[in-house]
Image: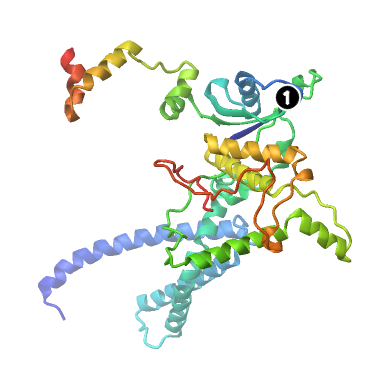
Amino acid sequence: MAAPGVLESDFSSAVTLLKNLQEQVMAVTAHVQALTKRVQAGAYPTEKGLSFLEVKDQLLLMYLMDLSHLILNKASGGSLQGHAAVLRLVEIRTVLEKLRPLDQKLKYQIDKLVKTAVTGSLSENDPLRFKPHPSNMMSKLSSDEEEEGEAEDGQSEASGKKSTKSKKYVPPRLVPVHYDETEAEREKKRLERAKRRALSSSVIRELKEQYSDAPEEIRDARHPHVTRQSQEDQHRINYEESMMVRLSVSKREKGRRKRAHVMSSQLHSLTHFSDISALTGGAAHLDEDQNPIKKRKKILKKGRKKKGFRRRR
Amino acid sequence: MVIDVLHPRKVTVPKTEIREKLAKIYKATPEVIFMFGFRTYFGGDKTIGFGMIYDSLDYVKKNETKHRLARHGLYEEKRALRKQQKEHKNRKKKFRGTAKANVGVGKK
């Protein structure tokens, strides 16, 4: 037993604490009774909710019941030794701990659902916002424009593309390789390339068609230079539209484009045949009006780099 | 945004008209709509350009580039006359390094 002096000071603090306790208990009881009344009146329907959250609800309620039972027991002087409620409490506690990582994983979804329920619309970064909207195809100009009988369609596409990407470091794809190619190997490679080009020339192709049994295919085949140029044009257009800038066209590009356009619109291929000397073994000869064979050397001038746009060939 | 304008059998649509149309579609005033980079494709009929719609004129003044603001009359670039600029440049040529910055100041 403690000394009588300590007992007296404890006595007064104990009395105040007990009074506090009584007030708080009354407040809590009132609160709980109000809640139970509302639950019984059906103010919180949970059939369409997440079952995970419902399980958590029930577990927490059982925990509370067991805890209050034990407190009652302790308050009326009994001991907690080997009480069955203690074991139940421990079990429920472990289950709740195990549920916590699941809770973390679902946190994002639950937040999104709650936000949608509260604000009634999707947030800006939601990927669901970027689905196609066929309603955008209809002209939104009001009916007072219909009196003009012209086919004036001012259609606008709102591309909600985000231009920010994650800042993860991506290492470059080019890996330096040791160069030890001899002159003979280079000659051989050149010959192989010429052979492949000759095989796909129009003369050889027509010979193949003549002697093969396969049915004749008629295709909308454009000149190979044209398709290369059209691919580059497409790449340029994509870059311009995604970055919202206009790139300038250098003289070389203009020349290439013009040549590609000219080649597709003339009857050039009627009289000019590509060189098949790689297959026939003769010397490489050219038609008079074609340019002489030039080895294309790429001399990169200083400052020619356009950041981000240069295509790796 | 990217703006696709289809105008068959007509000349390239002027930007003022496109502004009006955009204002109607997106329920904004024409003052906060800025457009640039319009290119008409070969053969006519289709023009593609870029445009931006701001929330208010304050944002416009803060975020838009100077030359585009100047096109709408919201910004005046102060430039000395061409002759003065050239004279200033020639005076600067007599000095090297940070002394170049003091040339005009000393003169005043």
Location of residue A172 (image quadrant):
bottom left
Asked if one can make out residue A291 in the rendered structure from this viewpoint, the answer is: yes
Left or right of A31 on screen, residue A40: right
Q: Position of residue B74 (x, y in %)?
A: 45, 17
Location of residue A47 (image quadrant):
bottom right
- Front in this rendered view, residue B62 or B86: B86
Colour scheme in use: rainbow
- Front in this rendered view, residue A52 or A220: A220
- Residue projecting furthest to the front: A283
Q: Is residue B73 above or below residue A204?
A: above
Give the total of numbered labels: 1
Left or right of A130 on screen, residue A222: right
Q: Position of residue A276 (x, y in %)?
A: 70, 57
- Residue under the point 13% across and 71% down: A6
Q: Position of residue A260 (x, y in %)?
A: 66, 41
Q: Position of residue B57 (x, y in %)?
A: 47, 23
- Front in this rendered view, residue A140 or A268: A268
Amino acid type indicated by mark 1: Ser
- Residue under the point 55% across and 43% down: A239
Q: Is residue A237 above or below residue A274?
A: above
Left or right of A72 on screen, residue A58: right
Asked if one can make out residue A48 in the rendered structure from this viewpoint, the answer is: no
Kindly identify which residue carries mark 1: A142
Q: Is residue B29 above or below residue A271?
A: above
Quadrant in the picture for the N terminus of chain A: bottom left
Q: Is residue A18 above or below residue A252?
A: below
Tell me which chain the residue with mark 1 is part of.
Answer: A
Other residues around mark 1 within 10 Å, as few (<14) / some (14–19) / many (≥20) = few
